[in-house]
Amino acid sequence: MSRIHKLSPRLANQIAAGEVVERPASVVKELLENSLDAGARRVDIEVENGGIKLIRIRDNGTGIAQDDLPLALSRHATSKIDTLDDLEAVATLGFRGEALASISSVSRLSLTSRPRANGSNVSAEDAAPLIQQEASAEGAWKVEAEGRDMDAKVSPAAHPEGATVEVRDLFFNTPARRKFLRTEKTEFGHLEEVVKRQALSRFEVGFSLRHNQRTIHSLRPAASMQDKERRIAALCGSQFMENSVVIDVDASGLKLWGWVALPTFSRSQADLQYFFVNGRVIRDRLVAHAVKQAYRDVLYHGRHSAFVLYLELDPANVDVNVHPTKHEVRFRDGRLVHDFIFRSLHKALADVRPDDRMNLNN
Ligand code: ADP
Ligand code: MG
């Protein structure tokens, strides 16, 4: 029998990566979350070969100090929480401190950054893609990791305020994982979906997405309702926009707003259903059930509703640390949330149902 021994950090990270890094889309999700947590107002995404060959994400957020660069790549290192109390009311998308460690253990990763000077503000006004902006060689640093998170070397670089993460050759050192990747087209489909969700979750942030040198999305920051609807139309189709109603309900510490499609705009698949809880896209059975119930009487059997909905509540009343990908949440008062969602949607739909209108007229 062989003796018990500690796994090397690299192997430990590769094992942990199994939970978070499934495909290029999961890398993009983690990197976008980091950019948003860093307060970026603009995020440019470039990918090649469905993200398998290259994922490059540049943001104009706070950036990372030179001394922190190697730490950013090591496991269980985060700037987002300090104590268990912080975790109870976490407001950032990330907090587990393992994404970069995991990703860098299964790819060739580089992180380049110039920390934002104290007091300097990011502007959403810069319409030019960050990639094209001039990079100052002063105060910018780069750290690289190739399938490991130890002894990462920091070297001087040129970069504007913010950060760029480049991930090349995903799973180059884990052939078993690489085998599970699908075609470039399928992988890009998943990746684009992730970008869509993030773009729907942060209207105030400008996004661009390029694939194999082609611009797929270019979204300016959206402030007014009209701008928001334009972004939704760009991402979900103008048909959806034209066939949906606005909902905005605020009661007992819960706020639900967004757009729900009229029952006449039902889908054969549940592919246009976006639900955000405090800016985080989630898939939750309780939420799904509440929505389904609300549509129950107005949709034909087998048809699916379409919606883009935002639920906002005190972060202390929702636990996001349920799963490493943080797709699931646990509400402190699930019943209250369920009833609130159901009643709000039911009313919104009833208000536009022709039958009901007829009833009112009678
Ligand atoms: P987490 O997001 O859970 O903290 P990550 O491994 O994703 O863990 O990132 C580690 C740390 O690196 C973050 O806590 C943050 O301080 C820093 N970081 C990562 N990406 C960025 C970015 N784009 N801009 C600024 N800081 C970043
Ligand atoms: Mg993160």
Image: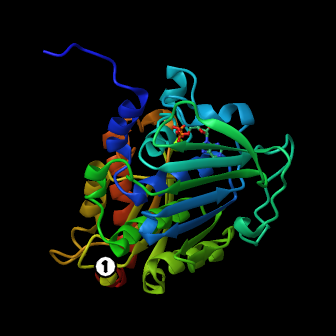
In this rendering, position of residue 60 left or right of residue 325? right
In this rendering, position of residue 140 left or right of residue 260? right
Q: Quadrant of the N terminus?
A: top left
Tell me: is circle 1 under 8 Å from ligand 2. Answer: no
Query: Which residue occupies 57% across, 28% down?
Result: 81
Pick the front one: 335 or 132: 132
Tell me the quarter of the picture where residue 361 sits.
bottom left
Q: Quadrant of ligand 1?
A: top right
In this rendering, position of residue 8 left or right of residue 114? left
Residue under label 1, please give it.
263
Query: Which residue occupies 75% across, 63% down?
Result: 124
Extreme left residue here? 1
Relative to 206, is 357 above or below?
A: below
As shown in the figure, which amino acid type bears the numbered disc 1?
Answer: Pro
Q: Would you say residue 93 is visible in this rendering?
A: no
Pick the front one: 185 or 198: 185
Residue 21 lies, in percent from the top left, at 38, 48
Residue 110 lies, in percent from the top left, at 59, 49
Residue 150 lies, in percent from the top left, at 52, 30
Number of other residues with Cα within 10 Å of mark 1, as a class: few under 14, some 14 to 19, many 20 or more: many
Pick the front one: 35 or 251: 35
Please say which color scheme the image uses.
rainbow
Relative to 334, is 309 above or below?
A: below
Residue 9 lies, in percent from the top left, at 42, 28
Query: Which residue occupies 78% across, 51% down?
Result: 161
Q: What secondary structure is found at the residue carrying circle 1?
A: helix
Q: How many marks?
A: 1
Q: Would you say residue 1 is visible in this rendering?
A: yes
Query: Which residue occupies 28% across, 79% down?
Result: 267
Q: Quadrant of the C terminus?
A: bottom left
